[in-house]
Image (tube, rainbow, N blue to C red):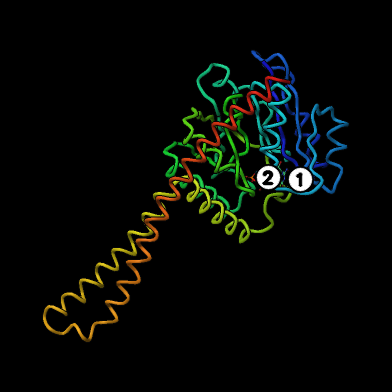
């Protein structure tokens, strides 16, 4: 059994040594533990620090591509390096290395494909009031959309079995955390939770510069994920709203028409017709989007088979 611990890094030269030092050297049931970092176009000495501290694999982007792409590239490289289990942790030493054995246990026991390390968000000292609310909102959204019971959907401390890592395809470009859970639920992967305590972190976030930016990015991410995984529901509901308003306005016109005052209500009729056409078009979009998402499932199935062939021919 080979475990690869991957750490996405953006300018983490300062905190990376401590994070690496805290990782476990041996775990029962695991034969080899290796570390992989994804240096996403850092402008500091992250890669050099990683090399000096004995990191086994370094994936380096010459330009910053964002956390989601880095995460996906990490999974890919870990699979190619023969990982049976991949743990993702952050370079700011927020997560405790000592929790890794507990995190991978459900995968070792064959009970889970993905294990999420839930933080006790309310008691994370460095999180501001707004950040706590937003983290909770993100988690509630993921629970609602995926039907899962995950308390902390934005945590970066997670373990993935080989099959889960092969099957996840992250498309967002900002963060992978929400999308990966929703996608895993859609793909019927088994997700487990453990509760973890965290270390205090006081270096500024690498992921977002300000709260307004965090809010903006979160809204964009959530809307895109919703459209990606529930396109039929999204468009059909939107279309239904237009059609319903059209029916009310059309009914108003018919009522006045029947009592002989239809002439004065032509605006209602025109608006009803326009809204009805828009609603109908949205209904057609729902069908097209549904067909596209069926194609996506087929493409993903082919991709999975290609990846398996690629990995077995190494
Ligand atoms: N590769 C890559 N890694 C990134 C990028 N942005 C952030 N990271 C890494 O992702 C991890 C999480 O980033 P943090 O800055 O800790 O995010 P945070 O705002 O503290 O998030 P919380 O831990 O939830 O509070 C760290 O290891 C970062 O180095 C990026 O653009 N590319
Ligand atoms: Mg952090």
Where does residue 85 sit, x and y in percent of width and height? 64, 23
281, above or below 56, in the image = below
Report how far apart the C-alphas of labels 2 and 1 lie in the structure.
9 Å
Question: Which residue is drawn at the image coordinates 67% and 54% (left, top)?
Answer: 208
Q: Label 1 neighbourhood size at 10 Å, few (<14), some (14-19), many (20+)? A: many
Q: Name the quarter where the N terminus is drawn.
A: top right
215, above or below 31, in the image = below
Q: Looking at the picture, tell me which residue is in the foreground, 72 or 11.
A: 72
Residue 129 visible somewhere in the drawing: no
Query: Can you identify the residue that label 2 sits on?
Result: 67
Q: Name the quarter where the C terminus is drawn.
A: top right
Where does residue 230 sit, x and y in percent of width and height? 44, 47
Q: Quadrant of residue 166?
A: top right
User: Marks 1 and 2: in contact by CB < 8 Å?
Assistant: yes
In the image, the residue with mark 2 has its CB under 8 Å from the nearest atom of ligand 1: yes
In the image, the residue with mark 1 has its CB under 8 Å from the nearest atom of ligand 1: yes
């Amino acid at each position: 059994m080979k475990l690869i611990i991957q750490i996405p890094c953006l300018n983490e030269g300062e905190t990376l040594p401590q994070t690496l030092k805290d990782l476990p050297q041996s775990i029962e049931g695991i034969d080899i533990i290796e570390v992989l970092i994804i240096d996403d176009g850092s402008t500091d000495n992250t890669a050099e620090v990683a090399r000096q501290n004995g990191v086994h694999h370094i994936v380096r982007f010459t330009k910053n591509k964002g956390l989601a792409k880095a995460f996906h590239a990490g999974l890919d490289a870990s699979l190619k390096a023969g990982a049976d289990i991949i743990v993702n942790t952050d370079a700011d030493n927020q997560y405790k290395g000592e929790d890794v054995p507990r995190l991978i246990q459900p995968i070792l026991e064959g009970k889970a494909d993905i294990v999420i390390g839930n933080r006790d968000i309310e008691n994370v000292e460095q999180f501001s009031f707004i950040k706590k609310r937003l983290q909770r909102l993100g988690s509630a959204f993921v629970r609602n959309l995926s039907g899962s019971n995950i308390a902390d959907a934005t945590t970066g401390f997670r373990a993935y079995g080989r099959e889960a890592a092969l099957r996840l395809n992250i498309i967002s470009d900002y963060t992978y955390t929400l999308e990966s859970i929703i996608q895993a639920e859609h793909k019927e992967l088994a997700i487990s939770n453990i509760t973890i305590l965290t270390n205090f972190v006081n270096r500024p976030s690498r992921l977002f510069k300000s709260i307004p930016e965090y809010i903006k990015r979160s809204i964009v991410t959530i809307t895109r994920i919703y459209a990606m995984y529930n396109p039929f529901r999204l468009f059909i509901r939107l279309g239904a709203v237009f059609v319903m308003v059209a029916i009310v306005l059309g009914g108003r016109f018919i009522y006045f028409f029947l009592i002989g005052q239809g002439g004065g209500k032509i605006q209602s009729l025109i608006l009803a017709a326009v809204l009805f056409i828009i609603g109908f078009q949205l209904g057609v979009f729902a069908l097209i989007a549904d067909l596209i998402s069926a194609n996506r499932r087929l493409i993903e199935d082919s991709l999975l088979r290609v990846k398996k062939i690629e990995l077995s021919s190494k």
